[in-house]
Image (cartoon, rainbow, N blue to C red):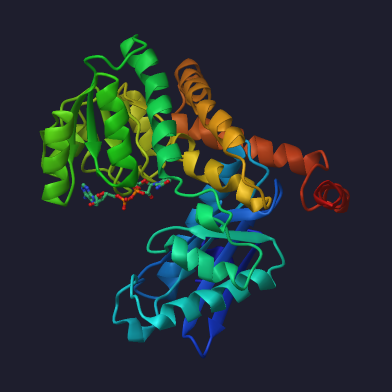
Amino acid sequence: MSVFDNSAFLNHESVHFFADQSTGLQAIIALHSTVLGPALGGCRVVNYVDSHEALEDVLRLSRGMSFKNALAGLELGGGKSVIIPPKDWGGNPRHNGSDRAELFRAFGRAVQSLGGRYIAAEDMNVSVEDAENMALETDYAVGLDVSHGGMGDPSPLTAQGVFLGMRACVKRALKTDTFDGVTVAVQGLGKVGWRLCEDLHAAGAKLLVADIVPETAARAASLFNAEVLDTDAIVVAKADVFAPCARGAVINEQTIGALDVKIIAGSANNQLSDDALGTALLERGIIYAPDYVINAGGVINVAPEAKGKVNHEWVNAKVLKLEDTVGEIIDESISSNRAANDVADEIALRRINDARASGRSWQSPLARKQALKQTA
Ligand code: NAD
């Protein structure tokens, strides 16, 4: 199949393939849209079966970033990048030799060659140190440590956004303003899930938890008085809220019929294995906070860095707004009887199309000149 016929290619502005012989770099950068601003999105390293799988992944993810950034009200477009690990990394995407730094520097040069149309950040198997190696070669890498002029770890902001978005759902489904006595099943106790548990526990929620690392789950049990469940059992556990904070596609053909909650609100990306499942959730009376809306705290946190700034106040104010944004999408979903993810996609697309139609596009020469004046 040709690249242009790939259904995930839909409306991408461009796709760039990079190879560097000396470091073994093989990478793809996909730019879905630069209408609202330079395309910002993470870079991931994954053991793909082949380059076709890598292409499919980067296309799907970059389109998602356009929607996420538009809905969060950021002056940023959407893009994403993937790196196929070199053969001599022995299939380990977290390979930690000195050649790793060289590979990320080569990737930084690739990013630089796009002249600012793409801004890279961390994603799966890419660390702050990797981003800092990219930044040695490009002006367009973000997600740097505070000590290097960055905004620091985005996870606490992501967790806060999930907490607030979940509260918007609880208000609507359970008709209460507090988490007192609300049962929340949290799958994944990593950087986001753990922080979310801390906040929910402090707010009086009863927690059910699961993690593939038994010690982590046991620690949550003792600290948060949580009940530990098996990693699959948690998906279909009886609770008020299910919070997927581990991996994608947990809502799928196999699990949807067995869900026993009133709300799904968590940080994991691509929670629905298929967009159509949003309608199935609506029909089952389950409120779904679209993943890319509720987990936007992380990208909001790096947005100032994309403009070469550090601005924690702006980030905090913007993350607080996520409660209203999630609430408005749920209200529109209920009143129009449409899936919440469809409502969110429509708002995001409208913002992009309106900017293009009204000549406010970042790509327009006038908008670029104005942006340059502002930075001068
Ligand atoms: P993380 O790697 O720190 O944590 C993931 C946790 O999930 C780990 O504790 C891991 O042991 C556990 N886990 C893995 N598979 C599991 C399974 N099948 N069942 C139960 N637990 C499992 O990741 P994170 O930064 O906390 O992110 C969590 C999710 O949120 C990811 O899907 C990520 O893409 C998404 N997300 C994170 C951020 C952020 O700011 N960190 C922003 C947006 C989206």
> Where is residue 304 shown, x and y percent of the image?
63, 45
Q: Residue at x 52, y 52 (%)?
A: 146
Q: Is residue 2 visible?
A: no
Using the image, determine if residue 343 lies above or below residue 15: above
Q: Residue at x 79, y 41 (%)?
A: 357
Which residue is more in the foreground, 276 or 73? 73
Which residue is more in the foreground, 197 or 313? 313
Which residue is more in the foreground, 161 or 171? 161
Left or right: where 278 falls relative to 318: left
Left or right: where 37 falls relative to 153: right
Using the image, determine if residue 149 lies above or below residue 88: above
Q: Is residue 50 visible?
A: yes
Residue farthest toward the bottom in the current orientation of the protein: 22
Q: Quadrant of residue 176?
A: top left
> Where is residue 205 shown, x and y percent of the image?
24, 21
Left or right: where 233 falls relative to 137: left
> Where is residue 315 shown, x and y percent of the image?
57, 36
Q: Residue at x 64, y 69 (%)?
A: 138
Q: Residue at x 70, y 45 (%)?
A: 36
